[in-house]
Image: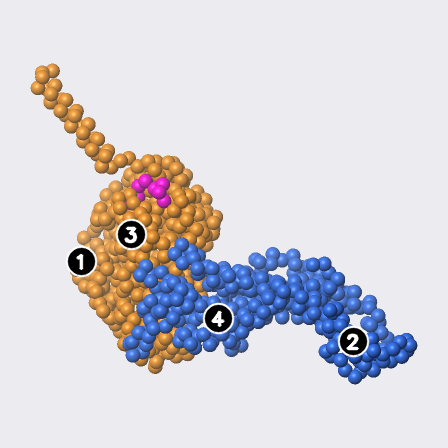
Chain colours: A blue, B orange
Amino acid sequence: MSDVANRSVPGYDESTAREAALIGMAEGVGGFDDELGGHEIEARDYWASVWLRLRRDKFAIAGGIFIVILFVTAFAGAPIASHFLGHGPNEPFLVSGGLDADQLPAGPWTHVGKLTESGEIEEQLFVLGSDSTLARDEFLRLLYGAQVSLEVGIGATLLSLLLGTLAGAVAGFYRGWADTTISRMVELTMAFPYLLFVITLAATLGTRLNKITFGFMGEGVFTLILVFGLLGWFYSARVMRGLALSLREKEFVEAARMVGSSNWRIIRSHIFPHLIGPLIVLATLNVAAFILAEAGLSFLGLGIQLPTASWGNLLADAPQYYTSRPLLMVWPGLALLLTSLAFNLLGDGLRDAFDPRGSR
Amino acid sequence: MTGRRFLGVMLAVFGVVILSASAAAAAPAAKKGGTVVVEMTTDVDYIDPQLSYYGETWKLEAATACKLLNWPDKEGAPGAVVTPEVAAGLPIISKDGKTYTFTIRPGFRFSNGQAVTARSFVNAFNRFANPKMQSTGIQFIDIIQGAQAVIDGKASTVSGVSAKGNKLVIRLTRASPDLLARMTMPFLQAIDTKLAGQIDANGINEYASCGPYYFSARTPGRSITLKRNPYYKGQRAANPDTIQVNIGNDVAVEFQNVEKGTSDYASGGIPATEWKNVVAKYGLNKKDGRVQVRPLLDVRYVAMNRSRPLFKDNPGLAKAVNWAVDRQAFSAQGGYLYGKRTGQVLPPGMLGYSQQSLYPLKITASSARQAKKLAAPNLRDGKAVLWAANAGVAPLQAQLIQYNLKQIGLDADVKLLPRAQQFTNAGNPKTATFDMTIERWGADYADPYDFVNILLDGNQVTNAQHNNYAYFNVAKYNQQMNSASLLTGSKRGTAYAVLDAAMMKDNPPWAPLVNSNDRNFMSARVGCLTLNMAQGGGPLLNVMCLK
């Protein structure tokens, strides 16, 4: 069955039928009803076409499903798991069971004891064992670490894309001195040794900003969002500038200009909507990059503040147990790998879906 | 020659041969040469002799310095006797105990060829006391006549230290029973005339020294190189040609390097979880074995800063912290044979140590309740800044203390710093922006003065650099410390024991945690080893030899 026939049934409405009948009459052709056995053809809009193409990419869909599950697990699953397990991610269990006989972190599926106020030992479960010799719940720290990773990844992506899109659109649309200034700023930002600059900013800004949490973020998350956002906008600015340069010459922009639309209205109503596709692609790829960058900085001790868990600081603590508890490196490593892979697969799929002419 | 005579001579010769052979078997000559490679996790504070006050630097200075008096390069009791080094013998002490006259032994030279004289020591005192140097340990010389005037900027030379020919005379303001031990500190090593003229609070990175080795190069944060002093004619060993210190590797990497023999000694230790494995694998304290552990005169503690609003005139909260800290868990972070839990200032083995049971060495439900009860009315704004080192197990220990404090309602913000920066900033009133700092103190020499007076005498808290990280300044205790320092023998011990107990019970400046062990892991290349038990622990690098 062809795509056209398959998709012509749903979405049929009266206006479509009227337009089709008018076209048919003008061309002296009989009504569609006769030719297609009573089914009408609906023209697919842009987003429907994108979704159709994306749907065909099984890897991208798998990536998307993983990300949805990750979100639910991180933001809903973590507090639920904490409630049912009876302890938090930062609580050490050194009284009983959190460390084994060799004073090493307890292995997976260990029952540990918690000293209650009455002096009794209350038994609780560590699904993935202890995180370190501090004997905290690795499973819960992994879940809460996912919150931090997603907060940093998404926050930094939103900030960098906001800055990049604004700067790129303005540069591409106005050209002239605005383009020159913004382009030079982009080149200047690109010329910075990115990693060293990020480390310096995190180390200096961090002391002042780490405490800002807005009531829901972990300590240090805001610093990383700011640092990554302020230094990560240049790539999206370049992409957006190129697109804006091309779009400003299109007929629909000419038409808008002719009917007296202001520049800002043209940018807002005619340029921006065309940037959404590339922006979504950039966003998915950026989220993955920023999650990895967060892990890197936390690994260096400059990212998320202790004792807040992040995949980076879980990974940083793990190597000292590499001979005795190698799984402690595996869990956060696997979480990072799968998340980064999921975002990249979704990003690739979206890119293909938004640009069907591009080669796969 | 008669037959009996011949037999006698032959027996004598035989005897000499046997004795020589047995002597050789008992103490085989150490193999000389090669490069001993040492790993340090973080950089030292300074290598400048009048500034460095860090155990890691002192391990190096034990090989480079020549002092009037020193500790012999031996372990155990023989290594704990103050012995003349550049001094020809022990000093002549006046009847009132205030004047010490040393005679300088000829033959000692700096690595640039300059001769060591009595003036070399006078220069050391003057440079040490110079206020522009901002030296941390000047409290050790404030009993010398004229030293305080230099410290206060009112004079340029310490009038109580003078040189005449090969005689060095030191005059004190009052008798000091531990003066000879103080003379073994690297601050007071001989310095050459060039270094004497270099007054720089940032420290000098290359200078001539008169011990078996000298600092030939230093790249801060990267490496330090010690080479044999070509002019050294003293009695101390100088086995390796070069001592190379590599700085900045993670403890896990250092461990691997020592394990496979590309490095010989990890000065910052090995991963805490590996101590049990290496003991199981190589044995503990075997003769010339790879794992050597000794108890240290040392204490790890949380200093509570009395100069800041949280702990100022707030002994209730200080006691609550002592009830709240989980000493057992703190020790567990350090791994196997880390040390012994404690709740008092003086370590076991120190004169004046008397075991007290003031605070719990293990958390129980009742101790947790007591901590909360004591803390509740004294929390003030309930917020604290906690400093800790950023390497090894220190971040884990900081998180543990942070959790313990949270249990009593104190919200601590942990700040991790490079170790040298941590204690340098903590000891400077202008940069001490902490409420609590996790510290460690190893004995400079075996005397309670070095713990109680040096760490808790309030008269020093206004100095540009000091070691009273608790900024503890209580007139009553200052007076008692001063009185105790003048006593000798068992009276001295009793006075310090009473002082320790009284402070910790009524107005604790610290939450003492653990008396740690000196744990050393060596490469298979190391052929001979002597640990420096008198001053800070670790191997004596000049004695270490390679197979």
Q: CA distance from mark 2 to mark 1?
A: 107 Å
Callout 2: residue from which chain? Answer: A
Residue B463 in the image: state x and y as whole percent.
38, 63
**Nearer-N-terminus badge (1/3):** 3
Check residue B340 for magenta coloring.
Answer: no
Q: Which kind of residue does numbered mark 1 sit on?
A: Gly
Q: CA distance from mark 4 to mark 3?
A: 40 Å
Residue of label 1: B489
Seen at 65% across and 62% down, the residue is A348
SS label for mark 2: loop
Q: Position of residue B374 (x, y in %)?
A: 31, 78
Q: Amino acid at mark 2?
A: Ile
2 or 1: mark nearer the eye? 2
Front residue of this view, candidates B257 and A107: A107
Closer to the camera: disc 4 or disc 3?
Answer: 4
Residue at image mark 3 = B293
Q: Are marks 3 and 2 on the same chain?
A: no
Left or right side of B1 for B315: right
Q: Secondary structure at mark 4?
A: helix
